[in-house]
Amino acid sequence: RNLTWKGFGIDFWLAHTSTVLADMTDEIWKAVAKDELDLSVKARFKLAEFKTALQIMNVGGNTGKVLLVR
């Protein structure tokens, strides 16, 4: 379960936000750790294939995330 939270300045933002948001973030991580959230991945695409990724994402009945990867 080597989970990592990545984003654009998310650590700084979380450090300077309200305690309510910090508590909510903790609850989300707890739910992730307990497998209580559906984090299934439907497909992975390279950034150059983003148009295909968008098409797949827009198909109805999707189960799982469509990810852009390196």
Image: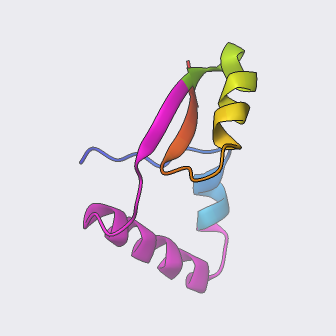
Query: What residue sits 64% from the left and 56% below the top?
Result: 12
Residue 69 position in % (x across, y down) = 55, 24
Quadrant occupied by the C terminus: top right
Residue 49 lies in the magenta-colored region:
no
In the image, is 41 to the left or to the right of 16?
left
Using the image as rendered, state which of residue 56 and residue 29 is in the foreground. Answer: 56
Q: Quadrant of residue 49?
A: top right
- The answer to whether residue 14 shows anywhere in this view is yes
Residue found 66% across the figure and 29% down from its top = 53
Q: From the viewer's perspective, is residue 52 above or below residue 43?
A: above
Q: Which of 29 and 34 is in front in this view?
A: 34
Give the x, y percent position of residue 27.
Answer: 41, 77
Q: How is the image coloured?
A: rainbow
The region drawn magenta spans 15-44
* Residue drawn 67% across the image and 61% down it: 13
Q: Where is residue 68 in the image (x, y as percent from the top left)?
A: 60, 29
Taking the image as shown, residue 3 lies to the left or right of residue 20, namely left
Residue at 60% across, 65% down: 14
58 over 31 or under it: above or below: above
